[in-house]
Amino acid sequence: MLFSEDVSTLPADLGYRGPTACNAAGITYRQLDYWARTGLVEPTVRSATGSGTQRLYGFRDILLLKVIKRLLDAGVSLQQIRTAVAHLRARGTDDLTRVTLMSDGASVYECTSNDEVIDLLQGGQGVFGIAIGGVWREIEGSLAELPSERTAEEADATADANDELAARRQARMSG
């Protein structure tokens, strides 16, 4: 099954720390850090704002990390991967589950229908394909077992509401 629309969405404010993103995508922290610093995959939930702050990667960020990892494993150059990622960003990410990336090891091709995949294979260009819908479900399964966190604003609001010490401080200041 190359193309599927049967995938669920996760909350946009749900983020995963670097080590969790690495675990789910199958990459090293060094790769993650390099790709973030060079702009290949930057965290969309929360970026690092200095020493001691944690990047939070969203589901789609981790999906992209996993796709990049698979392309690297297949021998595609990082330069070609950067071009493919730029193309995917330019086209939008609303229907990524309907995309299959095909490659001959040198170039990356985007296919959005079974006919395009067949045409590419008949032309002798495609050697392997990555069905993003399949990677989507795989990442969903991996992340279900890994720790996540909400953005700082939501976490602060929840902590303030449930923190007895914070409630005491507030009462002392106001009264």
Image (cartoon, helix red, strand yellow):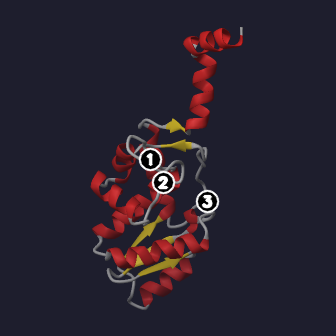
Q: How far is mark 2 from mark 3, CA to CA?
A: 25 Å
First in sequence: mark 2 vs mark 3: 3
The residue carrying pointer 2 sits among few (fewer than 14), some (14 to 19) or many (20 or more) residues within 10 Å by Cα, namely many
First in sequence: mark 2 vs mark 1: 2
Which residue is under mark 3? 5
Q: Is residue 160 above or below residue 64?
A: above
Residue 155 occupies which quadrant of the picture?
top right
Residue 10's x, y, as percent? 58, 45
Choose between 172 and 129: the one closer to the eye.
172
Residue 93's x, y, as percent? 59, 64
Which residue type carries mark 3?
Glu
The residue carrying pointer 1 sits among few (fewer than 14), some (14 to 19) or many (20 or more) residues within 10 Å by Cα, namely many
Which residue is under mark 2? 43
Q: How far is mark 1 from mark 3, CA to CA?
A: 30 Å
* Helix, strand or loop status at disc 2: loop
Which residue is under mark 1? 55
Choose between 168 and 147: the one closer to the eye.
168
